[in-house]
Image (cartoon, coloured by chain):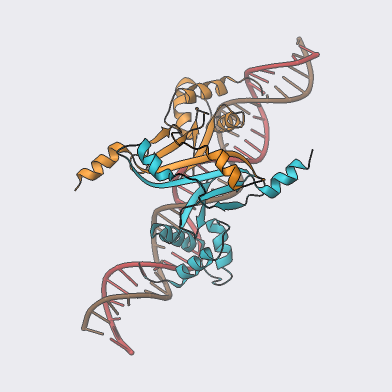
Chain colours: A orange, B cyan, C brown, D red
Amino acid sequence: MNYSYQREAILFDLKGRCDHPTAAQVYETVKQKIPNISLATVYRNLTALCKNGDAASFYLAGTEHFDGNVDSHLHFSCSKCGRIYDVFNSFDIDITEKTAKAFPGAAVNRITVIISGLCESCNKIEKNKN
Amino acid sequence: MNYSYQREAILFDLKGRCDHPTAAQVYETVKQKIPNISLATVYRNLTALCKNGDAASFYLAGTEHFDGNVDSHLHFSCSKCGRIYDVFNSFDIDITEKTAKAFPGAAVNRITVIISGLCESCNKIEKNKN
DNA sequence: ATAAAACTGATAACTATTATCGTTTTTATT
DNA sequence: AATAAAAACGATAATAGTTATCAGTTTTAT
């Protein structure tokens, strides 16, 4: 893989935010720095960065979201405000290990956990409606 | 919600299989029974059935997969053969409960867990390559 | 300096899904 | 049974997200 100014800018942008952006959202911000960058370049590089282990991604309702944090963690998605929060693995078990036990002979590569519901602030608003 | 012959056939098909089909796959099989059924009808009804609690769905690589089994369970997706296996919750913790603790004040509605890797048979083939 | 490989922007193509609309079916009421 | 409103239908257009193509540019190794 060769160096590219565009890829560097994309990774820099992704690493500097924690909102789990879509490709289109990364495109919008990187465009401020590189006005003539193409959306295809953003897609290409986000995919390459994930493949390379520099980024991660997960799907939410059919749309891919990217994450500059490649450390194992879960995601909480609020169905009202749409925000995606990190959930730093507070679980007292190693899901990967347990899964390997449940599937003897299989190779576990990745575990995606998406918790959905109402975040604290949206839930508070919801409760006040009564 | 009124009765519809198409919806009944769609739910019957979904309940009778365990391969977590996409809308297009349900369409293909239901078409054998109702040749003039529309793909839009399949989408409409799968969505309605999920909303109604008679079915469930999750996204895999941008595509929605449907599940006639609405009991809590996880999914193992093989990256080679594409098959999706059910993982009946052998974990000794209640993820929902733990999540609620990690997010005090939030309301947890649903937890989607997708484990990806190589299933036992594909992993065996992979190992024999050496 | 040069040539191959990798990467780019622009855009066409594709896949999955949703929206629209005129027609048909279902359901409740006469 | 007739009827009218609501719900659902099939066909298909529209949309969203993503991937593929391709000619031109940048990077890298020599």
Residue B33 screen position, x and y as percent: 56, 72
Residue D18 screen position, x and y as percent: 55, 40
On the image, which quarter does residue B53 sit in?
bottom left
Name the residue nearer the viewer: B17 or A40: B17
Identify which residue is drawn at 53% across, 70% down: B36
Q: Quadrant of the N terminus of chain B?
A: bottom left
On the image, which quarter does residue D28 sit in?
top right
Name the residue nearer the viewer: B128 or A117: B128
Seen from this angle, which residue lies furthest front? B92
Q: Quadrant of the C terminus of chain B?
A: top right
Q: Is residue D5 above or below residue A100?
A: below
Relative placement, left or right, of B100 versus A10 is left
Relative placement, left or right, of B51 versus B89 is left
Residue B15 screen position, x and y as percent: 51, 64
Name the residue nearer the viewer: C17 or B118: B118
Relative placement, left or right, of C15 versus A33 is right
Identify which residue is drawn at 46% across, 57% down: B71
Residue B70 screen position, x and y as percent: 45, 58
How many numbered marks appear? 0
On the image, which quarter does residue B24 sit in?
bottom right
Q: Is residue B77 above or below residue A76?
A: below
